[in-house]
């Protein structure tokens, strides 16, 4: 048993301690909750002198029971091959660390990379129309052709959510569902077969422990994960009020792009999307091309046709260091820290090389801090 992980789980189980407070304590301890469950009160008071005393009292009063509950959860996730992702640790979605209310712990089962270069959240009404279904089908099918490595994120709910997941599966895209309950159940149960298929082509993600029921407040809370996990949030259909508009507002607050599909002015379930567009909150989207343009995502088919001829010209115009970086970006986008390690160059030098290549339109900085070779 990994005690450090168990302690992180336990920190989320302290009664009356909010998620933000738990995350604050975790960060304060250098992303290691172990001392919070091992040290005595006086020692912790010294280490947490700038933390409100009420938080320390909550921790001391609840940590014994919380640790026992965490051990139970650890045994459950181990038995069912569920991953436990702790804030800032391996596999934890980097985009979520940009959010001040990020979950301290996430439970994940699947094979998709939650730090994929291209991630799009798709949300909308549970009472979607045939128009909404057609939009999901067409946009996702076109995305699969133009950007086959995009990850589609939604919430497994009725309506736009489930159609987004199913169309992603049908076109070969990975898709992840952020659920509002524990991993010991699927809600709604009629989506079980889709959820099972997603484990082989995407995954299931939640901040909730086993036994947690799909209560209304949990759905509102999980919307922030759907928003923060992606580069952009696409609203396909929404009434004047609804959970998808809440997700869009959260996404905007996180600095994410918000996109919306317009509809007829007489359609109830287009009022929300039309309103987002009218108030300049969302970019108007009618096609996959619009999404790529709005997010500055390259079309893979265009990349492949343009890359090879220009690569040959680069040998005569680039320095040895520039060529080293270009070669490392040949087959995959990489973050600067990866390039530093693989090139064995100082970070300042790699940064300077990347800047020069950007200025010459040879590489482009993409979502997630990854550099992409565009020529």
Image (cartoon, grey):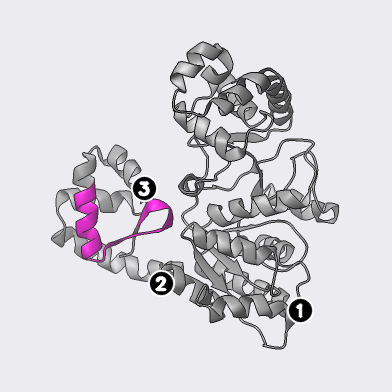
Q: Mark 2 = which residue?
A: 302
52, above or below 334, in the image: above
Q: Is residue 120 visible?
A: no
106, above or below 174, in the image: above
Span of residues in magenta: 351-371
User: In which image quadrant can residue 314 be found?
Assistant: bottom left
Q: Earlier in the sequence, mark 2 or mark 3?
A: 2
User: In which image quadrant can residue 153 be found?
Assistant: bottom right
Instruction: Identify the residue shown where x is 51% and y is 63%.
Output: 252
In the visual, does 344 lie left or right of 272? left
Q: Mark 1 = which residue?
A: 130
Q: Earlier in the sequence, mark 1 or mark 2?
A: 1
Instruction: Identify the residue shown where x is 25% and y is 61%.
Output: 358
Q: Is residue 190 visible?
A: yes
Separation (CA) of disc 1 from disc 2? 32 Å
Q: In the rendering, at what x and y percent does residue 107 appear?
A: 65, 38
Q: Secondary structure at mark 1?
A: helix
Is 356 in the magenta? yes
Q: Which mark is residue 256?
A: none
């Amino acid at each position: 048993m990994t005690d450090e992980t168990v302690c992180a789980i336990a920190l989320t189980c302290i009664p009356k301690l909010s998620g933000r407070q738990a995350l604050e304590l975790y960060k304060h301890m250098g992303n290691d909750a172990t001392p919070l469950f091992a040290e005595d009160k006086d020692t912790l008071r010294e280490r947490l002198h700038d933390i409100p005393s009420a938080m320390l009292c909550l921790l001391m009063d609840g940590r014994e029971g919380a640790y026992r509950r965490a051990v139970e959860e650890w045994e459950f996730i181990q038995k069912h091959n569920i991953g436990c992702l702790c804030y800032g640790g391996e596999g934890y979605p980097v985009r979520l660390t940009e959010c001040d209310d990020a979950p301290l712990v996430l439970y994940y089962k699947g094979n998709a990379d939650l730090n994929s270069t291209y991630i799009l959240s798709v949300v909308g009404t549970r009472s979607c129309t045939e128009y909404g279904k057609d939009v999901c089908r067409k946009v996702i099918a076109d995305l699969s052709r133009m950007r086959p490595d995009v990850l589609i994120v939604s919430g497994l709910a009725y309506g736009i959510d489930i159609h987004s997941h199913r169309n992603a599966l049908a076109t070969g895209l990975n898709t992840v569902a952020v659920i509002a309950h524990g991993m010991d159940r699927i809600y709604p149960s009629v989506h079980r077969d889709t959820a099972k298929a997603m484990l082989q082509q995407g995954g299931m993600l939640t901040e909730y422990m086993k036994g947690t029921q799909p209560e209304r407040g949990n759905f509102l809370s999980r919307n922030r994960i759907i928003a923060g996990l992606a580069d952009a949030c696409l609203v396909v259909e929404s009434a004047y009020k609804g959970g998808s508009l809440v997700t869009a507002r959260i996404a905007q607050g996180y600095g994410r792009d918000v996109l919306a599909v317009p509809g007829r002015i007489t359609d109830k379930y287009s009022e929300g999307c039309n309103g987002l567009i009218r108030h300049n909150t969302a970019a108007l989207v009618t096609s996959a091309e619009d999404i790529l343009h709005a997010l500055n995502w390259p079309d893979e088919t265009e990349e492949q046709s343009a890359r090879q001829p220009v690569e040959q010209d680069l040998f005569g115009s680039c320095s040895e260091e520039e060529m080293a970086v270009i070669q490392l970006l040949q087959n995959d986008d990489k973050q600067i820290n990866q390039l530093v390690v693989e090139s064995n160059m100082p970070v300042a030098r790699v940064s300077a090389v990347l800047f020069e290549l950007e200025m010459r339109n040879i590489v482009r900085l993409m979502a997630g801090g990854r550099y992409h070779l565009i020529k």
